[in-house]
Structure formats: C-alpha cells, structure tokens
Image (cartoon, rainbow, N blue to C red):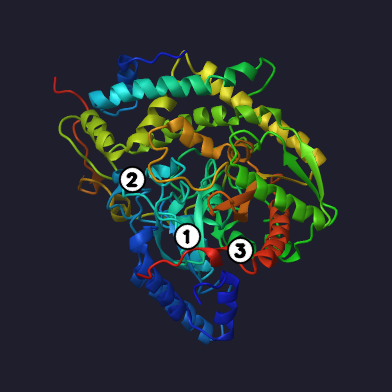
C-alpha cells in the first residue's frame, strides 16, 4: 500500500478497504525500517499521527463527509510550526523548542484530516541546496545513499522517494521544493507567491519564501495544493483571490494547442548532457501531444543568481535578528544581554547561515546599499519584465529544473559558488513571484539518476503547470511502464 | 576585485551580533570577497531608469478589522523562553552598571 499514490490511498480509505490507522502504521513501519539509512525525519510524532488517524477513522465510520485526502499521511518540513511538536529549522538555535501555535498550513492540513507523521530534515533555516547544512546531519538520497537529496527540503523529497510518506510539505525560496524533487524523482510545486499562507513559516527571505506541495504524482500534488492554498488574514502578503482549479487541470491534462516556451538562457553550458537529453525528449512528447514548442529569450536571467544572492541574504540578515536568545530558542554565555546574544548566535548558527547573515549585513550597510541591494532589486524588475514578454509568446515556460543530477555528499560543501549554481534555473520564478513545478523527466544516461523537468506559469495561473505536468507524466509513465520510483533501489533489505 | 579584510568581517559581525572565531573571520573574509565578485555584476544592468522591486505583489497597506480574537495565553507565550520570572521574559542586564 505504501507504494501507491496518495489519491489511490484516499480511494482505498473511502471504500473502507483500509483504515487510516492501518495506513499510518504502515508508513511508521517504513520509517522504522529505512530512515536509519535515509535520515529524512528530525522528529517522528508516532502517537500524534495515530491519534489523528483514529479520529479520521471515527468520523468516517460515523458517516461524515470527508475531505479528499482525509486519513492520508504526510511529512512536514521542519520550518513550519506545529503546536507542541519540536520545530528546529535544522538549526541548533531552536533545539528543544516546541511552538505554542499551529501555522496556517498545519491548521489546514488538520482540517483536511491529513495525518502529520513528523518533521523533515532541511538545510539550516532553509539555506542550502543539499541538506548538508542541517545541524542534525545530512539526509541521504534514496537513489544512492552517498548522494544529496537536494535542498533545502531534502528531508521531504527523500521521505517521498523512500515511501516513508506519500505527501510532504516543502518551502521554496530559490528552488528548495523543486530541486529536491528533481534529484529524487518526485514532484514538487512552488505555487504563485502569496497563494499559500506564510503564517507560522519561519521566515528566511520574506519576499521570496513560499510553501507548497511535494508528492510522487502531479495529481497528488494538485490535491495537496488545494488543501493548503487560499487567502489568510494572518498573512498580509496572502493573495485574496480564488485558488486556481489545479485538481481539475491535473485531471484534464490536455496540452493540445498550448504554446510552450523553451527558455534559451536556461540550457547549454553548465547543464549535464544527460539532463538536457531528457529535457529535449520531454519537449518532443509535449509536441507529439499537440503543443506548440517555441523558443523564448530572457536575457536578464543571467543576472538572476547574482541578484538572488544579494536579496535573500539581505532579507535573512534582517529576519534572523529575531533569534536573540531572549524569547525562545537556546541561550548561552554570560554577561550583558548583548554579550549573551553574540555568544548564543555564535554557537546557535551554522557556517552557511553566518555566511549569509554577514553577506546580507554587508549588502545592506550604508555606503554599499545602492550598489548591492539596490541594484539587485532593479535586476528583479528586469527579470519580471523578461517573464512578462515571454508569457506574451507562450502559455507556460519550461527548462530543466536543476543543471545536474544529485551530486555526492561533501562534493560542493567547501565551494559556496558551485553550490549556489544548483539554483540557476529555479531562482528566476522566486524573484518574479510566479509558480514553478518540477516533475521527473527520466534517468540520466551518465549516472542512472533522476532529472527534473520544470514548468513555469504566470502568477495565479498555477493550473497551467498542472495541466502540462499531468500530460507529460502520463506519457512518461507509459514509456517507463510505471512511475519512475519503481526503478529506485530497495532500501532496508539487508 | 572586492577585498574584504578580517577587520571588515569583524565589524559586520559586531553589527549582526555574532561572535566569530579568528578562523571564521579569516575564512569569511576570503569567501565574502569571492561571493561579492560574483554578485557585483548586478551593477552592470541596473540603469537609472529601472525601478526597484522589493516585493512580487503590488500590495501597499493591508488592513484588517480591529477586533478581539483568541490569542496565546501568557503561559503559552512564555513557554519557549530561556528564562522567565513573574509572567515575564527574564533577560540579562541590558544597561551598564554606572
């Protein structure tokens, strides 16, 4: 049962073929079996998950009308607060902290009867592309345990790829949902900025952060998207508009007559040959389904990475000022409040977080503000204009999600610039605030590891990504004779 | 070529309220110089006529009704505090003893 899609599990639940308690236990067993190898979870809430599951079962047997995903388990990225459950953001700074409230995402999950299994590992405060920056040790890629599962949401993607959960929540500031999906053969969606509430999402870069669904199929992601999206008065940047009908779009999956724009700047040098080959094969499939493939140019995308690595650190240096050892989190050192603050932040933050706080402090400091942060904000405008022009020529835009397949753990950890290049194709959407999806495009010829196909849609037209994604996924699954994760190595078997 | 010195990093660390070891100061000075060289290219295209974007949504002020709604109890709000006393956050001394 754990190898099924979330939608298939939901069907079995509603038909009474299985209870939520049984389904939850099956996933808890799988966690026991394989997470020693994968390390996707930082905390497993066994009792809480079983309690939630039995409540769903009780309501269902009482004949209540249940939401679509009621009773299906989920893994939650440890950057979203859940009342009473340890939330660390992968940092020593919050070790032992139990939040006194639920994030809006968690509230909606609970209202939908979705069973929260536990909290997943991540790069500290979501800063990273490999989950190696977690203070609690790296997560391993289920396809090859010596490789990274992507980041920052590597725990969520790895939990899906190792069948420890059929659904997960991620957050995406520069690609932290999509790049992990790409390198683990799973599906990840960053909705339009403002589509999912940020209330209770520990902030990294507030103008870029967006929570979204992670799953093993496009339709599963669509159901989860509808469960968590929607206007929230507790987040002033939440969009007050109807959530696009993404489930209907994923069920429709018809791309006939659609214009699909290939971004010239997001391919070529720096992209692995096998990744590009799979990308082009996916394009041929979409063309064979009746879509029109056009090439578009977004000439300022070459500057996106530079702008991002000024804007995100600047916002992070301000956001992480809240960790002051006074109101929550750890406290260390003696002396005045300032001395305690300095020494707590010394031991509480890891290397990458310190690097970004110092970089952001520099970019925002008087004398450098205009040259760095100010210029980056202007580039952000140019990138949004590039997207606007491109969307006049195409309904959706596409690219490989990440330039390479999963690299080895440790391979890039001493070279920040090489690490940042992982996000080259995912960052532009965050800067413009539009939606992006990654779904598997196949296994690269060089290394047999999964690669991702990225689809980007205009703001609040997230349904278009689901339409295209579902169409491509159906054809690829036929070609592969089943979901790509069927080819992943079996874990846990000694 | 950006040239960030150990003392520059020490000053930034002071502003950011983080104690850094000598190793960290030296390492960050080197890394920051490399990163700033890579990101400085944003200046090449940021013309006078381009307005800055600080946020992807065209929002100005968002208001809500000023009504009482449930909130955390004092106990809940203090539940994560490193130290507390008499229903308040207890913090180390803030002002000097003169």
B10 left or right of A370 in image: left
Chain label for disc 1? A
Pointer 3 and pointer 2: residues touching (CB < 8 Å)? no
Residue on which disc 3 sits = A217
Upstream in sequence: badge 1 or badge 2: 2
> Would you say B97 lies left or right of A212 here?
left
Q: Position of residue A176 (x, y in %)?
A: 51, 46
How many residues crowd mark 1 within 10 Å: few (<14), some (14–19), many (20+)?
Answer: many
Residue A360 shows in the view:
yes
Q: Quadrant of the C terminus of chain B?
A: top left
Check disc 2 and report the residue beneath it. A91
Task: Determine whether the residue tagged by mark 2 lies in a helix, strand or loop.
Answer: loop
Residue B72 % position (x, y): 37, 54
Local packing at callout 3 (Cα closer than 10 Å; few below 14, some 14-19, many 20+) is many
B55, A466: nearer the viewer: A466
Q: Quadrant of residue A318?
A: top left
Residue under pointer 1: A106
Which chain is mark 3 on?
Answer: A
Image coordinates of residue A416 in percent, x first then y, are 43, 32
- Please tell me which of labels 3 and 2 falls first in the chain: 2
Question: Mark 1 or 3 closer to N-term?
Answer: 1
Q: Are marks 1 and 3 in contact (CB under 8 Å)?
A: no
Residue sitting at x 25%, y 30%: A342
Q: Quadrant for residue A308, please give it.
A: top right
Q: Is residue A488 left or right of residue A293?
A: left
């Amino acid at each position: 049962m754990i190898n099924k899609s979330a939608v298939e599990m939901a069907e079995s639940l509603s038909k009474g073929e299985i209870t939520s308690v049984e389904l939850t236990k099956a996933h808890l067993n799988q966690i026991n079996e394989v997470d020693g190898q994968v390390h996707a979870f930082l905390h497993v809430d066994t009792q809480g998950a079983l309690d939630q599951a039995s409540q769903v079962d009780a309501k269902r047997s009482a004949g209540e009308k249940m939401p679509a995903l009621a009773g299906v388990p989920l893994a939650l990225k440890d950057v979203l607060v859940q009342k009473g459950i340890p939330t660390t953001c992968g940092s020593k700074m919050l070790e032992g902290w139990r939040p006194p409230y639920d994030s809006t995402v968690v509230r909606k999950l609970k209202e939908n009867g979705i069973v929260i299994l536990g909290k997943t590992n991540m790069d500290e405060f979501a800063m990273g592309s490999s989950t190696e920056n977690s203070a609690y040790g790296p997560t391993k890629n289920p396809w090859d345990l010596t490789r990274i599962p992507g980041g920052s949401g590597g725990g969520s993607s790895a939990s899906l790829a190792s069948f420890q959960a059929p659904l997960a929540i991620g957050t995406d500031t520069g690609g932290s949902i999509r790049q992990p999906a790409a390198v683990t053969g799973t599906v990840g969606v960053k909705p339009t900025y403002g589509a999912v509430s940020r209330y209770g999402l520990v902030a990294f870069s507030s103008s870029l952060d967006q929570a979204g669904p992670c799953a093993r199929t496009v339709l599963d992601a669509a159901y989860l998207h509808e469960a968590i999206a929607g206007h929230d008065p507790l987040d002033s940047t939440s969009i007050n508009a109807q959530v696009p009908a993404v489930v209907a779009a994923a069920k429709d999956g018809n791309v006939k007559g659609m214009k699909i724009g290939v971004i010239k700047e997001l391919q070529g040098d720096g992209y692995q040959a096998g990744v590009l080959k799979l990308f082009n094969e996916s394009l041929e499939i979409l063309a064979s389904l009746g879509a029109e493939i056009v090439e578009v140019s977004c000439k300022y995308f070459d500057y996106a990475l530079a702008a991002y690595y000024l804007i995100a650190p600047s916002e992070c240096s301000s956001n992480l000022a809240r960790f002051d050892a006074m109101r929550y989190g750890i406290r260390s050192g003696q002396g005045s409040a300032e001395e305690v603050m300095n020494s707590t932040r010394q031991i509480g933050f890891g290397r990458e977080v310190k690097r970004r706080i110092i970089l952001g402090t520099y970019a925002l400091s008087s004398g450098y503000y205009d040259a760095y942060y100010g210029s980056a904000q202007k580039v952000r405008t140019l990138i949004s204009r590039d997207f606007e022009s491109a969307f006049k020529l195409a309904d959706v835009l596409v690219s490989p999600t990440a330039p390479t397949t999963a690299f080895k753990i440790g391979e890039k950890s001493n070279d920040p610039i090489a690490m940042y290049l992982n996000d080259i194709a995912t960052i532009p959407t965050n800067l413009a605030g539009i939606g992006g999806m990654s779904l598997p495009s196949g296994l690269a010829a060089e290394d047999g590891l999964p690669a991702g196909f990225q689809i980007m849609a205009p703001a609040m037209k997230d349904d278009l990504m689901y339409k295209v994604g579902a169409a491509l996924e159906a054809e690829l699954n036929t070609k592969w004779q089943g979901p790509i994760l069927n080819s992943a190595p079996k874990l846990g078997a000694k | 070529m950006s040239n960030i010195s150990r003392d520059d990093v020490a000053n930034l660390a002071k502003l950011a309220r983080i104690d850094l070891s000598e190793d960290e100061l030296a390492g960050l000075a080197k890394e920051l110089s490399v990163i700033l060289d890579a990101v400085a290219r944003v200046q090449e295209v940021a013309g006078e006529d381009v307005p800055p974007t600080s946020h992807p949504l065209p929002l100005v002020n968002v208001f809500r009704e000023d009504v009482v709604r449930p909130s955390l109890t004092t106990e809940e709000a203090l539940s994560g505090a490193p130290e507390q006393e008499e229903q308040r956050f207890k913090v180390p001394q803030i002002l000097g003893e003169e």
